[in-house]
Amino acid sequence: MLNLAALLEDSARKIPDRDAVVLGDTRLPYRAVDAAANQVANLLVARGIEPGDKVALLCPNLPYFPIVYYGILKAGAVVVPLNVLLKGREIAYHLDDSDAKAFFCFEGTPELPMGTEGFAGFHDTEGCEHFFLVTADPAAASPIDGAETFGAAVSGQGPVFDSVVTEATDTAVILYTSGTTGQPKGAELTHANMVMNVLTNHRLFGMHPDEPDIHLVTLPLFHSFGQTVQMNSGFAAGSTLVLVPRFDPKVALGLMQNENVSFFAGVPTMYWGLLGALDDSVDVDKIAGNLRTAVAGGSSLPVEIIREVKERFHVQILEGYGLSETSPVATFNHRDREPKPGSIGTPIWGVDVKLVDAEWKTVEGADEIGEIAIKGHNIMKGYHRRPEETAEVMRDGWFRTGDLARRDEDGYYYIVDRAKDLIIRGGFNVYPREIEEVLMTHQAVSLAAVLGVPHESHGEEVKAFVIKAEGAEITEDELVGWAKDQMAAYKYPRIVEFRDTLPMTATGKILKRELS
């Protein structure tokens, strides 16, 4: 019997007055976060949410995120975290596909009106019964007609709750990820998946009971990287999480300096941004004196950035690899071994990794290229309501990732190529098929091919090659503007190029390798 919420509850018992989360002038101790999560659990039970029901959460890095997240788990329900950049149409899809019964949505800002998009998506669903608008001011009235505020909903709910007993194999979280074809699909991760990944992170990065880590959390908590490596692992270790709702390198450096940050995790573009923002106003020596762990994932770090971070901050970046389907951590460069720049390291404790060919046969030789397959305590139960797609990637406990890699003679793995057609923009996965399908709903678009092109700061940018419908009149800028309204900010193509034809095979498949 195991419930992921125990990570918070145990720390709340042992260190109730230690700061759990920090945001600006707000500092919430563990006892306060736990009590607020209990109110959420009481609310859900009062509204008829039962163990196993799905509850969606759309919120940036604010104290509300862990409060609602653990409250859902305490009630025995399943957390469905959503990307804060999703539009109404996309939100409706996720709510329907996950069978969500309730939805907590942050109101957002005028520039990013999450609440409006969320409420629109909620109204376009059939099975989601409850919508709670999380406002920046808990006492504020709802700015959206008909939307119940979180503050009003939890008012009067008790701060004590006996967490529902869940089995280790019960689903705790559904993380949405996209394949190279079709719509996003939800990876079902169990309580055991998540807890074991947390415990393995402690082995990787070390525990400091006498001087707990202070995390700077710039990674979005709705994503598996920030959620497991920082929030869940940090709460289990009694760490303090300094939250950053939106990454800004100058703000991040200021917080690292003023909050004595000891743990930083980020994607390559974040490290690139930190180095570029260094100036005379930053006390680099103070930051370096506190920073003991730096972690990177999402895509490979340039060797020059690794070198410069070590030179300026006196810390070795540890690179790793994982996916939503692997909870997420699968391989890492370990503290007690010499890291290899550009490598994703070796398998974590309790996890096996091998390279396979198209027929699942093991690729044996050093530096031979094969697809990464993973087996261990971190592997998902499967894709929610998608047995056929689960069967395509799972066999005898092994999960094949779609990522090509090589392994050197020391057992270190190196990514050679991502899953076919996958674009990684600023650490976010963008899947061309989804973008192409949306573009082709525009009446002026006859055919579209989407791929990634190199970009200095984002790693890759999304580019669309489009054949116009006969007689259609539309400019590149107009199509980009339309796409911006239809898709999350990290997805829509910033570059559009119109073509009269697209290169194709004899069977009609577009030859993307001939486009650039």
Image (cartoon, rainbow, N blue to C red):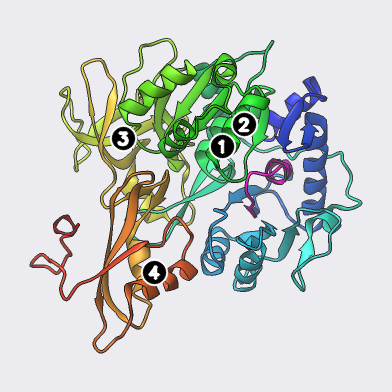
Instruction: Check disc 3 and report its element: helix, strand or loop.
Output: strand
Say whether marks 1 and 4 touch (CB < 8 Å): no
Q: Which mark is residue 480?
A: 4
In 3D space, how far apart are the residues under numbered discs 3 and 4 (Cα atoms)? Answer: 37 Å
Q: Residues within 10 Å of mark 3 (few under 14, many from 20)?
A: many
**Quick one: which residue is furthest to the bottom in this view?**
471
Q: Which residue is mark 2?
A: 254
Q: Considering the numbered disc 1 on the image, is that residue within a helix, a strand or a loop?
A: helix
For the C terminus, the image quarter is bottom left
Q: Residue at x 17, y 59 (%)?
A: 515
Q: Using the numbered discs, state the Cα–Cα distance from disc 3 to disc 1 in whole angstroms.
A: 39 Å
Is 116 above or below relative to 235? below
Identify which residue, 12 or 126, lies in the foreground: 12
Q: Which residue is mark 3?
A: 373
Q: N-terminal of the two: label 3 or label 4? A: 3
Q: Position of residue 49 (x, y in %)?
A: 73, 55
Q: Amino acid at mark 3?
A: Ala
Closer to the camera: disc 3 or disc 2? 2
Residue 64 belongs to magenta span = yes
- If you read the primary sequence from the N terminus, does the residue marked by circle 3 or circle 1 appear first? 1
Frontmost of labels 3 and 4 is 4
Q: Residue at x 66, y 31 (%)?
A: 241
Quick check: marks 1 and 2 in contact, CB under 8 Å?
A: yes
Which region of the structure is painted magenta?
56-74
Determine contact: label 3, label 2, CB under 8 Å.
no
Q: Is residue 22 visible?
A: yes
Q: Furthest-right residue in view?
A: 156
Q: Which residue is mark 1?
A: 250
